[in-house]
Image (spheres, rainbow, N blue to C red):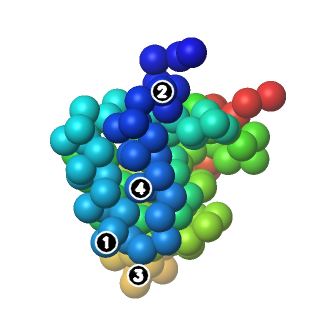
Amino acid sequence: MPASAPNSKANQALIAACKMEDADAALAAAKTAIKGRANIEATDERGATALYCAVEYGHVALAEFLLEKGANRNPPMIASWFNSLRELADHYHGHGKLYELFVPDEIKQAHALARAESKTGGGPATQLYLQMLRELDAPTNRRR
């Protein structure tokens, strides 16, 4: 059994917490599981990490907590149609706070420049931002 498999009660509790419907209860249960020495990279029967499950269920505060605790922000995607947690967040929850957790800072900065530039009709910052988005969306982590 892999080291990250849900083979302990704490790991199972962490995965179960990330799949709860209530966001506040999920965060509280995850904190308890981490205190109980759950592996931050614990996986469910599908191979999805706790962070993947938190994103899948739309838990912003829980995803932030797991990232603060050292969760891998680029785990292998278990579904071949997603390249990243950013795409998973976008698919299930749109371009909100959860999505923003997985957009690199340099792209956020380029977006701010492009927005400012758009007031004057667009230009190089807009082109740079669009290129960065294309590169971000390039398939890099997809299972075949």
Dot label at residue 17: 4
Q: Which residue is mark 1?
A: 24
Front disc: 1 or 3 = 1
Dot label at residue 7: 2
Mark pair 3, 2: CA separation? 57 Å
Q: Is residue 130 visible?
A: no
Q: Amino acid at mark 1?
A: Asp
Count neighbours of disc 4 (C-alpha within 10 A) and say few if under 14, some if 14 to 19, many if 20 or more: many
Q: Are marks 4 and 2 in contact (CB under 8 Å)?
A: no
Q: Which residue is mark 3?
A: 120
Q: Earlier in the sequence, mark 4 or mark 1?
A: 4
Mark pair 2, 1: CA separation? 25 Å
Mark pair 3, 4: CA separation? 48 Å
Q: Earlier in the sequence, mark 2 or mark 1?
A: 2
Is 89 displayed left or right of 62 in the figure?
A: right
Q: Amino acid at mark 2?
A: Asn
- Most foreground residue, 37 or 142: 37
Residue visible at 51% across and 58% down in the picture: 19
Count neighbours of disc 1 (C-alpha within 10 A) and say few if under 14, some if 14 to 19, many if 20 or more: few
